Structure formats: structure tokens, C-alpha cells
Image (cartoon, helix red, strand yellow):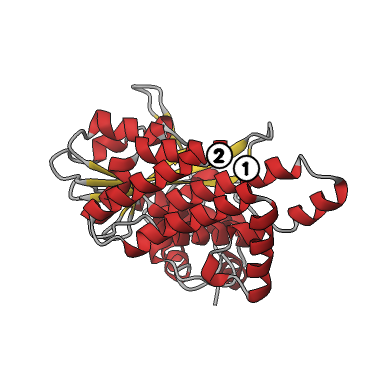
Amino acid sequence: MLVYFRVKIHRLYCFNCHCRDLEELHFLSSPRARITKALEQRIIEERRERSIRSVAEKYRLRWELVKDVEKRFLARKYARTPAAHVRRIGIDEIHIGRNPDRAYRFLTIVRDLQSGAVIHVGDGKGIAALEGLSKKLRKKKLKVVAMDMSNAYSSWVEKHFPKARIVFDHFHVIKLMNERLDKLRRRYIAQLDASQRDQFKKLRMLFLRNMENQDADSRLILSNIRRNFKELGDAYMFKEGLRSIYATAKNALEARAAFRRWATLATETGSKELIAMAKTIREKLSGIITYWTFDHLSNASTEGFNNKIRWLMRLAYGFHDISYLKLKIFQLPSIQPQKEI
């Protein structure tokens, strides 16, 4: 049974310092609170299993009030995120929508790759998004940083943690190759007539799909493309060749030789997209082969984690309160997916 009661909160005035304040009551978290500490604690406990809407309906409260109670709790809980013991981190960014000026908005997420805990959530991307992170980590402890092939993140590591090893995640290496392949496909589309252009536009996913996932019809289409559009067909096979290095190389020595051979052959094709990819492979080779040095260390779990962030945003129809979203991201490793937020 819900109990409502009225309490007069006195406004206090100090004749010595002339300060004004509100009377504090032991059963309220603040003088302006509309629910008791006990109910706030109950809300926090029930939010572990139930949605905001469900809790709000149960206690006949506004959705915003329940959210604000949880937000204050999370702000206290994650005011400090100890990371001095962390040895391996993964850095990744996620698109969370657009600003009022229609510019894309990003968050940069840093996680402990061993425990999965979130240790930093920064606004935007690049070095600015990592502000304050270096103070949480210890130079003597941090050994490995997994990331995409962003020059910004690499320079940040080299500046603050010069002894840490950089691992360029194999997921992002293949992703970059897919982007080069798609760029080549679009270059071909621009040269075709209207009917051929429509056909090629429908084949985008075919080029992005891995060979083992292609059915017989798709393999036949790829064979025809390679016969009629050699550069495009060859680029797809080079993408598959890049994937095969990760599948077959047993150690860093084998991987180094395989990547160098791949880069040489890619350059010899004369395709500007493959030449650009080969240049990137050569420039980032030390970080790419570190994947084998550290027992196939990967940032792959980050993609699954990003999917959980998208799940959060989808259930909330997008987060208008970004500070609340960031706090929920810190909590996300311990949240079980449910139908409502």
C-alpha cells in the first residue's frame, strides 16, 4: 500500500553569513525530493529486473522521476572508475545520432579487455574523446591497447603510454578492406549505363559477404564479374586473401611474411583502392601482427557491446539525456537484455 504525506520544509537563514538554505530531513535524499530514501532504494533495486515504465506504473510515479532516481544512483556509483590495475584495454567509437546542427555524434568507449568493464566514455572521437583517461591508467601496468587504425588513437598511446603495445584489431583491418572494395564498386557503378548501374547497386552485400557464406548462385555471379570486370573481381579475392592470413598464419613471423606478400601483389594490380590498402598494411604492419604476439587479442567483443548500446538506444527511442546514456553504458556489462529500458 502506498502512503502519501505532506511535510513542511523550512527555509533557513543564517544571520552570521547571510546564507539561505532548506531544512534537511533524514528520510529524504535532498530537501527538494518528492519521494523518500526508502522508496528511492526500492526503485534502484527493482530497476535491475524491470523497466522504468513498469516501476513508474507500480508506484504511480512519472517516468522522468524514476529515471532521475536511477541517474543519481549511477552518477554516485560511477563517479570514480578504478583502472590502475588494468593491463589491456580496447578503444572503439559508436555513432549515437546527430546533433541539432545535423552533424554526426559519437561516443568513444574504452573497456578493460580482461574483465569487460567500461572504464571511460568520452564525447566525440579522436584524442579529445580520451581526455582524462591517461590519469586513470598506470604506465607500468598498461601493456596492450587494441583499437582501429586511427592515427589519433595511436598517437595518444605513443604519447602517454610509450611502452604499451598497439594491436590493430583484425575486425577493423577487414572492415577497412571492405570499405576499399565498396569504394571500387562505386567507382565502377559511375562508369556504367543506367540498367547496369541498377544491377550493380543490388550487389553491394554480395561483395561484403565472406566466400564461405556465398551460395551457388552468388559464386556464379562473382565468377562472371571477375571475367567481365577483372579489377573488381580481383579485389574481392584480395579481400578473401586478407581474411585467410588471419585463418592460417600460426605466428607473427608467418603473418608478417604473408601480409608483405599480400601488399606486394595488391600493389602490382594497379588498382588505386588496393594500392591504398597495401600502403596502409605496410604502415601499420607492426600493430597488425601484434594480434599474434598476444594470442589473437581482439577487440571483437566491442562490436557485441556496441550492439547492446544500440539496443539501449532503440528501446529508449534514442537518448535525449546523453549524460544518462553514458552512465547506462558504464552499467551495461551487468545489464541483462529485456524488452524495455
Label 2 belongs to which residue?
A: 273
Quadrant containing the N terminus is bottom right
What residue do we see at 22% from left, 52% from top? 253
x then y, percent, for residue 311: 56, 62
Tell me, yes or no, if residue 15 can be seen here. Answer: yes
Q: Which mark is residue 87?
A: none
Q: Label 1, secondary structure: give it.
A: helix
Q: Are marks 2 and 1 in contact (CB under 8 Å)?
A: yes
Please tell me whether residue 279 is drawn above or below residue 241 in the rendered image: above
Three-letter amino acid code at the position of disc 2: Glu
What residue do we see at 20% from left, 33% from top? 162
Q: Which mark is residue 183?
A: 1
Residue 92 shown left or right of residue 66 in the figure: left
Q: Tell how many labels.
A: 2
Q: Nearer the viewer, residue 274 or 229?
A: 229
Q: Nearer the viewer, residue 61 or 271?
A: 271
x then y, percent, for residue 295: 23, 60
Pointer 2 or 1: first along the chain: 1
Crowd tier of the residue under label 2, counting other residues whose Cα lies within 10 Å: few below 14, some 14–19, many 20 or above:
many
Query: Residue furthest toward the right?
Result: 194
Mark-to-mark CA distance, 2 and 1: 7 Å
x then y, percent, for residue 231: 61, 47
Q: Nearer the viewer, mark 2 or mark 1?
A: 2
Q: Label 2, secondary structure: give it.
A: helix
